[in-house]
Amino acid sequence: MIRGLRWGDAVVVALATALVTSSFALGYAPGGDSTHLVITQAGVDPRHYPLTENRAIRVEGPAGVTEIEIQPGRARCLRSPGNQGICEAAGWLERPGDMAVSLPNRLTLQVRGARSDFDSMHY
Amino acid sequence: MNTDPVLADRRIAALAALAIGLQVIEAAIPSPVPGIKPGLANVITLVTLVTLGWRAALAVTLLRVVGASLLLGTLLSPGFWLSLTGALAALAVLAPLLRLHPRHLSALGLAVPAAIAHTLGQFLLAWAVIIPHPQLPLLLPPLLLAGLITGVVTGILTASVLADPRIQRHVRDPSTTQSG
């Protein structure tokens, strides 16, 4: 091992570790709670709904009706005409950026907050 | 300490040559993540700093950055400016810390702040000038972690280089020679 280590080394390494840890904590903190649901449908302006109280929404689409359930802080696709159940399988949308899609009804549901979480990083 | 200017120049030239060699070899090693590399040339910077002082370290660093970029064909490219900024940021942090060596800080305690400053300096240049993207700070935590790890590694390497008796007698502060 290395000889001649000084007490200052421990201080420096501890400070550097604290800097790295706090940078992770600040940079990668969860994006907070979702505040609203955005329903985007082909040919229609996006509609925004606050995630404050229980609410049921019915959206008409080319394949039928998509039923959306809103609860405080989250939303989900309850029933949708797609026969593979992909929209329903997305489950509760809670984290900002979570999304459910119904291709037959040509719509997407996304919850958003003050800050979006990211899915991945590449460059 | 020998004050012969010719000898001092030769020492700086020899150390710069070593640093250029290390940097060119390192450039040939594929990195798993762009922007992260060991920074072995910083071992030479630290050894120069401790044995010959910060003016010599500045000379070696500038020679290394320019010389290596000539060999790698990156002169005046973004990579060159990043390399220069990182190296100067590291030196700016090292100059005040040098007073604490070796009484309060060993080479490890110099290498870690130097590596972090290198990373931060490069990042600030990249963010301000090269890629001014609002989400770029999300890259900073892993880069800082890499800086911490490479700082510890280069610090250990520098400590073992400085512990060599042939180097040891050039180390400036006499208090290290007692333990060596």
Image (cartoon, rainbow, N blue to C red):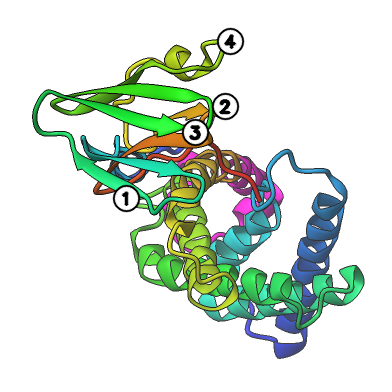
Mark nearer the viewer, 2 or 4: 2
Q: Quick check: do tags 2 and 1 share a chain?
A: no
* Residue that label 3 marks: A3
Residue B140 locus on image (x, y percent): 46, 51
Mark nearer the viewer, 2 or 1: 2
Tag 3's secondary structure? loop
Dot 2 falls on which chain?
A: A
Against B168, residue A38 (above or below) is: above
The residues bearing labels 2 and 1 have C-alpha atoms spaced at a distance of 69 Å
The amino acid pointed to by label 1 is His
Dot 3 falls on which chain?
A: A
The residues bearing labels 2 and 4 have C-alpha atoms spaced at a distance of 10 Å
The residue under the point 50% across, 42% down is B142
* Residue that label 4 marks: A84
Q: Quick check: do tags 2 and 4 share a chain?
A: yes
The magenta stretch spans residue B172: yes
Could you tell which of marks 3 and 2 lies nearer the N-terminus?
A: 3
* Residue that label 1 marks: B104
Viewer-side residue, A84 vs B33: A84
Magenta region, residue range: B157-180
Tag 2's secondary structure? loop
Location of residue B88 by image quarter: bottom right
Against B179, residue B74 (above or below) is: below
